Image (cartoon, helix red, strand yellow):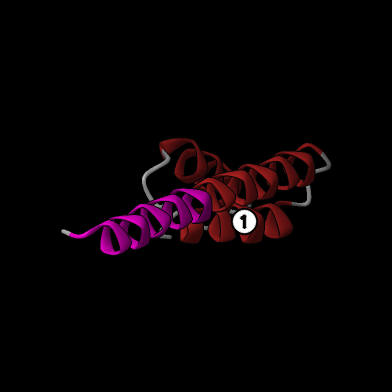
Amino acid sequence: MNHLNRQVAIRKVSWLQDTEDLAVMESERLAVEGYNAASREEYEDAVDYFTKAIRLIHNDHRFYGNRSFCFCQLGQYVK
């Protein structure tokens, strides 16, 4: 790999890491909004926030658990 190709590869890896970091930050922000909505007993809004967080970071079990709690509070046990 020549010097120019190595620099391009490093930039791509850096860009991918920055993009992943932004997704994590946004999913955490959405989760906080979900927690806040749930604490106000606004469970439908909370479900929406947790669903958006899951779309960004699909392997965080906290988002699924909190969304499940909100579905239970809404009486939607089959979701």
Residue beneath disc 1: 47
Q: Where is residue 76? Give x, y as percent.
A: 52, 58
19 falls in the magenta region: yes
What is the magenta range? 2-20
Q: Where is residue 43? Give x, y as percent.
A: 70, 52
Write the residue at 78% across / 40% down: 36
In this image, 31 relative to 67: left or right? Answer: right
* Name of the residue lying farthest toward the front: 3
The N terminus - image quarter: bottom left
- The dominant secondary structure in magenta is helix
75 vs 11, nearest the viewer: 11
59 vs 36, nearest the viewer: 59
Number of marks present in the image shown: 1
Q: Where is residue 20? Give x, y as percent.
A: 47, 51
* Name of the residue lying farthest toward the right: 40
Write the residue at 27% across / 56% down: 3
Q: What amino acid is labelled 1 in the image?
A: Val
63 vs 14, nearest the viewer: 14
Write the residue at 41% across / 38% down: 61
The C terminus - image quarter: bottom left
* Name of the residue lying farthest toward the left: 1
13 falls in the magenta region: yes
Q: Secondary structure at mark 1?
A: helix
- Neighbor class of circle 1 (other Cα within 10 Å; few <14, some 14-19, many 20+) is many
Q: Where is residue 47? Give x, y as percent.
A: 62, 56
75 vs 47, nearest the viewer: 47
In this image, 47 relative to 13: left or right? Answer: right
